[in-house]
Image (cartoon, rainbow, N blue to C red):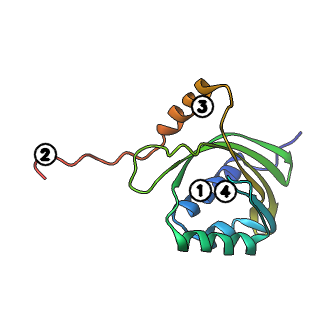
Amino acid sequence: MTRSFREGEVTDLYVRLLDAWNQRDADAFADLFALQGHAIGYDGSLLDGREEIRSSLRAIFEDHVPAGYVGKVRGVEGLSGESALLRAVAGMVPPGAHDLNGNTSVQSLVAVRLVEGWQIILWQNTPASFDGRPDDLAQLNDELRQLIPRRSEPSPNG
């Protein structure tokens, strides 16, 4: 199959999604979705359509400061010249923390190229519990820890 999409365009869409969450910007997050896009949250909740995604995230961001994402793309596959599937893994780091909070997930994103550019049709965020395989979960968490931004240590002289 001929790929008429550029993998980097779809990867960039995913990076912008995580950045919008991390900036607690409901508008930027929702605007990455097609009008009839869907988001399935970590808890299994389904948000249908850009405006429901926007209003739900506004409520979340107004009520508390959620943990931020660190994520790693595992692969991008062209489904057709105008659609693609991105697979990723992600972990969450609470504000001010320097380690994952235990909410590790496997994420999938289906994107389509519309007149406006690449937009998300479906984003699914599934808990990565790896039941019965604690070593696999530990390995994934170790991999994601490498993505946590390290703050520079203060010098002893101030």
Q: Residues within 10 Å of mark 1 (few under 14, many from 20)?
A: some
Q: Which mark is residue 156?
A: 2
Is 154 left, or right, of 91 in this rendering? left
Farthest residue, direction left:
157
Which type of secondary structure does the marked residue at label 4 adopt? helix
Alpha carbon separation for disc pair 2 and 1: 35 Å
Please provide percent x and percent y for residue 59: 61, 73
Q: Which residue is mark 3?
A: 137
Q: Earlier in the sequence, mark 2 or mark 1?
A: 1
Q: Earlier in the sequence, mark 1 or mark 3?
A: 1
Q: Which residue is mark 1?
A: 18
Which type of secondary structure does the marked residue at label 3 adopt? helix
Q: Nearer the viewer, mark 1 or mark 3?
A: 3
Q: Are marks 1 and 3 in contact (CB under 8 Å)?
A: no
Please provide percent x and percent y for residue 107: 69, 46
Alpha carbon separation for disc pair 3 and 2: 37 Å
Image quadrant of residue 115? bottom right
Return the residue nearer the eye: 118 or 14: 14
Q: Are marks 1 and 4 in contact (CB under 8 Å)?
A: no
Which type of secondary structure does the marked residue at label 1 adopt? helix
Return the residue nearer the eye: 130 or 15: 130
- The residue positioned 65% from the left and 25% from the top of the image is 133
Q: Nearer the viewer, mark 2 or mark 4?
A: 2
Which type of secondary structure does the marked residue at label 2 adopt? loop
**38 in relation to 144, above or below:** below
